[in-house]
Image (cartoon, helix red, strand yellow):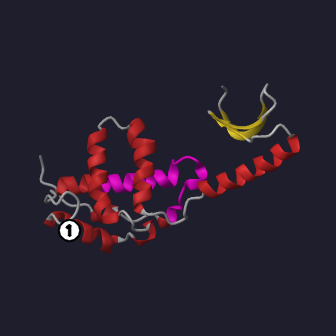
Amino acid sequence: MARHSIPHLIQRSNGYWYVSFEQERTSLETKDRKTANKRFKEWLNRRAQNDQVDSDPTIGVILTVYDEQHVQTKVKDKERSQNAIAMLRDFFEDMPISSVDRKVLQKWIARRKAGTTGTKNIGSNASINRELTALRSACNFMHKRVEPIQHRIPGWILPDIAGVFLDTPPS
């Protein structure tokens, strides 16, 4: 079946009308063109409601999308990236991105260094920096590269993570 990025109506040889979109076909359960058009509009409205992403998504949503669309498909060391994401989830999961500022990041760093968040292990500066890099990457991904494009978040909402990285001893 051909891949279509725009939903459209097709009538199959059995006479029934279907919505064809990407690699899926959904029956509209009618042979009547007028009824099919009406049901197609309803299908589009339901899909539009499902596709809406909050303009201020939670960090948990951002990490999930980043993992599904980037880590799983493009990152070579998936396990390391997923471990960093797991460390972030415990603290940031339900927090809207607009709430993340330096004060919140410093609070997370303090908890991470004390071993009171994530896996409850004390985080080294290098581990914490890697996790902050994952958070920054996920936010930037949601701003610049997430698909569909309607899900992209505005740049002004991104947290300033650059100033909170920790010094690491030279290797």
- Residue 166 to residue 40: above or below: below
Residue drawn 59% across and 50% down?
Answer: 149
Horizontal arrangement in the rendering, residue 56 relative to residue 128 (left or right): right
Give 119 or 152, whichever is nearer the viewer. 119
Q: Does the segment drawn in magenta span residue 133?
A: yes
Magenta segment: 132-156
Give 10 or 110, whichever is nearer the viewer. 10
- Residue 50: percent from the left, percent from the top? 60, 55
Residue drawn 16% across and 60% down?
Answer: 120
Residue drawn 51% across and 61% down?
Answer: 155
What residue is shown with label 1?
Answer: 111
Q: Quadrant of the N terminus?
A: top right
Q: Which residue of the protein is positioned furthest toward the bottom in this rendering?
A: 103
Given the image, on which type of amino acid does mark 1 rest?
Answer: Arg
Question: Which quarter of the picture shows residue 162?
Answer: bottom left
- Residue 109: percent from the left, percent from the top? 23, 66
Residue drawn 86% across and 40% down?
Answer: 32
Give 16 or 84, whichever is nearer the viewer. 16
Circle 1 — which element? helix
